[in-house]
Amino acid sequence: MKKLYERNAVLHSLVWLGIYLVLNTITDNIASAMNIEFHLVSAIPNLILGVVCFIYLKRTHISENIGLLTKSTEKSSVMLFYIPLLILPFLNLLYGINTSLSATAIASLAMMYIGVGFMEEVIFRGLMFKALEKKWNHYLVVAFISFTFAIGHIVSMVAIAQSGGDTLLQIVNAFVVGFMFMIVILASGNLTVCIITHILYNFVANISMVGYTHTEIITFNIMITGFYFVYLTLRGKNIKIFLKHRDGSHVSV
């Protein structure tokens, strides 16, 4: 796999995406056949995949190239200590906590979303982003990564029989949150904090009573993300450098 990364980084990211999708398709089919909750089946496989991927990235030193457990390229004070980012997961608690969940359900949700959050951030804003920024227009890269991450949530229509309207709201919200993660990557190169926030976002949403993506949540997310983007573009240095070198000729984070 390391040789594939060195020869074709884009294909390398797609291979990991394929492994992730195949694993979750299989576990989804097993859960459906057994008529049990998806997270009860997929928790351990997703966690194992995340651990295997983490070990691979560390041993090959690819982790250093994608900002995993590396030093931020921007001061924490300039990043406002990542507070705007870390606010997002906890907005779902405005609708209360689902007290009917069992300890087993909470544990399986936690394990599943540790694996899912880690893999999705590594694939989209780690491997794929780093591969594409060297080849594509930088504006296009940011839009493409955010859009593909968001459109992937259309599987909810099939996986949990979600309505088209609710799925559209989820896609819009995923785009906004995904763009927020991209802002953090561009400004600080800190993939680790994006992974932590992604895990928290999914987990908190699923133990809360939010039920589905509310327009109020999307509105708050848009406002916070918009503020953070404008602030970091004016206050920080890396976003301006990245967008200035639009053709992929300069790597800033």
Image: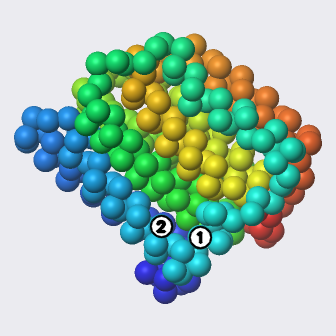
Task: Tell me the quadrant of the picture where the N terminus can be found.
Answer: bottom left
Q: Quadrant of residue 49?
A: bottom left
In percent of width and height, residue 248 lies at: 74, 66
* Amino acid, disc 2: Phe
Q: Residue at x 63, y 56 (%)?
A: 191
Q: Residues within 10 Å of mark 2 (few under 14, many from 20)?
A: some
Q: Which residue bears the numbered disc 2?
A: 54
Which structural element holds mark 2? helix
Q: Residue at x 78, y 51 (%)?
A: 187
Q: Quadrant of residue 62?
A: bottom right
In the picture, measured across the screen, residue 132 lies left or right of residue 18, that is: right
Q: Which residue bears the numbered disc 1?
A: 63
The reply to whether residue 217 is visible in this rendering is: yes
Q: Residues within 10 Å of mark 1 (few under 14, many from 20)?
A: many
Label 2 vs 1, first from the N-terminus: 2
In the picture, measured across the screen, residue 101 lies left or right of residue 128, that is: left
* Amino acid, disc 1: Ser
